[in-house]
Amino acid sequence: MTTSKTRSIVSLCFETEIDFQKNLDRLIALIDQSPEDAVIVAPEVCLSGFTYERFDEAAAFTVHALEKLSQYLEHRLLIFTAITEEEGNFYNIAYALHNGAIIHRQAKAKLFALGAEHEYFCAGEEGAIVPFVFEGITIGILICFELRFKSLWLQLEGCDIIAVPAQWGKLRSEHFVTLTNALAVINQCYVIASDASNIDTSGMSGIITPFGGEIRNRDSELLTSHYENRTVESMRRYLNVGIK
C-alpha cells in the first residue's frame, strides 16, 4: 500500500546525439524544467546511444554523468539507463537516482538480438527485475525489449509505477503504444514510458494510468502528469484481479 498521495511524474522524449556531453546537458536542462517532486523517466542509453565502437568512452562518461546528475535532482527521482563497465564486461544498466544516491540499479536482462545487443553487452539476471520502494511508492523498471515478456510483467505485479526507458524501433511504434497501454491496464498501475526521438525510434513516450487513460509526448520533449495512489487503489478495488 502506498503512502505518498500525489507526486508529479514526467516522461522525456529527446534525440540522442553523438556528442555525449550535449546529451547530458539536454537531460539536465529537462530535469531543471521538471517539478521539484517529479519521478522522471528518460530514454534508454540517452547519454550515448548504442555506440558500440565507443563503449570504453561511453562507460567512462557514465561515471562522470552519475556524479553530475546527482547534483541536479534534489527531491526528484530520475530513472534512465547507461552503458556501464563492470569487471571488463559491459552492461546496459538502469539507474534510479535520488538525492545524490543510487537507490536502485538493474542490468538489462533481455537483450535485443535484432540490434546485435547480445554481441556487445552481457545480460543481467532476470531475477534482479524486482520492485523497489521510493517514498512509499512501489516502482519497477522494464528496459525496452523486456516490455515484450509477460513473465516480467508478473514479476512487477503490485507496482504503483512501472518505468519503461526505451530506444524502440520506429517500424514497431504501434507495438510500443499497445504494450505500454496493456501493461498499465493488466498490472493496474501507472506506466511512464520514455523513448528517444531519433530518426529510427518511435518517439512515442507517454504516461498511462491504471484505468488506461493515455497521454503521449508527441512533439514535446517533456510531458508532465500526476501520480495519485488513490487511482491505483480505486482501480484495484473496482476490478479486483488479486493485485495487492
Image (spheres, grey):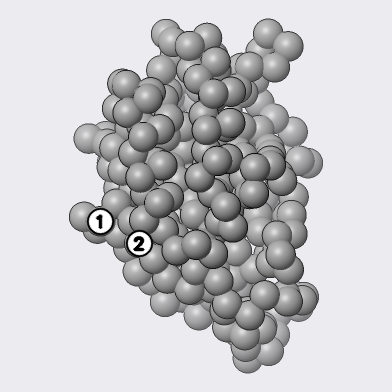
At 66% from the left edge and 13% from the top edge, which residue is drawn?
89
Residue 196 position, x and y percent, is: 34, 41
Please state which of residues 79 and 73 is positioned toward the viewer in this rendering.
Answer: 73
Instruction: Check disc 1 and report the residue beneath it.
Output: 220
Numbered disc total:
2
At 68% from the left edge and 8% from the top edge, which residue is drawn?
88
Residue 103 visible in the snapshot: yes
At 35% from the left edge and 45% from the top edge, which residue is drawn?
29
CA gap, disc 1 and disc 2: 7 Å
For the residue labelled by badge 2, is the local secondary structure a helix, a strand or a loop? Answer: strand
Q: Quadrant of the N terminus?
A: bottom right
Residue 214 position, x and y percent, is: 38, 71
Residue 146 visible in the snapshot: no
Disc number at residue 156?
none
Instruction: Give the image quarter of residue 156.
Output: bottom right
Rate crowding at label 1 as few (under 14), some (14 to 19) or many (20 or more) other CA atoms within 10 Å: some
Instruction: Check disc 2 and report the residue beneath it.
Output: 223
Q: Amino acid at mark 1?
A: Ser
Is 66 displayed left or right of 116 in the figure? right
Q: Is residue 146 above or below residue 193?
A: above
Instruction: Give the image quarter of residue 121.
Output: top right
Residue 62 position, x and y percent, is: 54, 24
